[in-house]
Amino acid sequence: MVDGSDPTQSNWMRYVNCARTVEEQNLEAFQFRGAIYYRTTKDVKAKQELLVWYGLKFARKLGIKWKDFVESNRPDKRGTV
């Protein structure tokens, strides 16, 4: 288990969490020359949570079921999870 609660033993990545939908993300991961980097996809205000959507395959590993994914991405349900 990774514990990022101690700022002296962690870095800024402790503030990155998994978004519930692709629309909710404000940060995206990308690979360049074998390294993983992150970039913002929207303006991020001070103290705002950093959210990355890693895709459905990773969501399944987190226990997010396809039915839940489809339901949460309906236009009338977005952002209400």
Image (cartoon, rainbow, N blue to C red):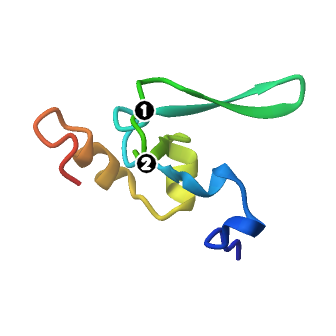
Relative depth, front residue between 42 and 59: 42
Residue 20 in percent (x, y) is at 38, 49
Specify whether 57 is left or right of 23: right
* Figure quadrant of the N terminus: bottom right
Label 1: how many residues lie within 10 Å, few (<14), some (14-19) or many (20+)? few
Alpha carbon separation for disc pair 1 and 2:
8 Å
Q: Mark 2 points at which residue?
A: 49
Q: Name the residue under label 1.
A: 44
Residue 79 in percent (x, y) is at 22, 44
Residue shown at the point (55%, 54%) measured from the top left: 15
Relative depth, front residue between 17 and 57: 17
* Figure quadrant of the C terminus: bottom left
Q: Give the amino acid at mark 1.
A: Val
Residue 42 in percent (x, y) is at 42, 24
Q: Give the amino acid at mark 2.
A: Glu
Q: Is mark 2 on a helix, strand or loop?
A: loop
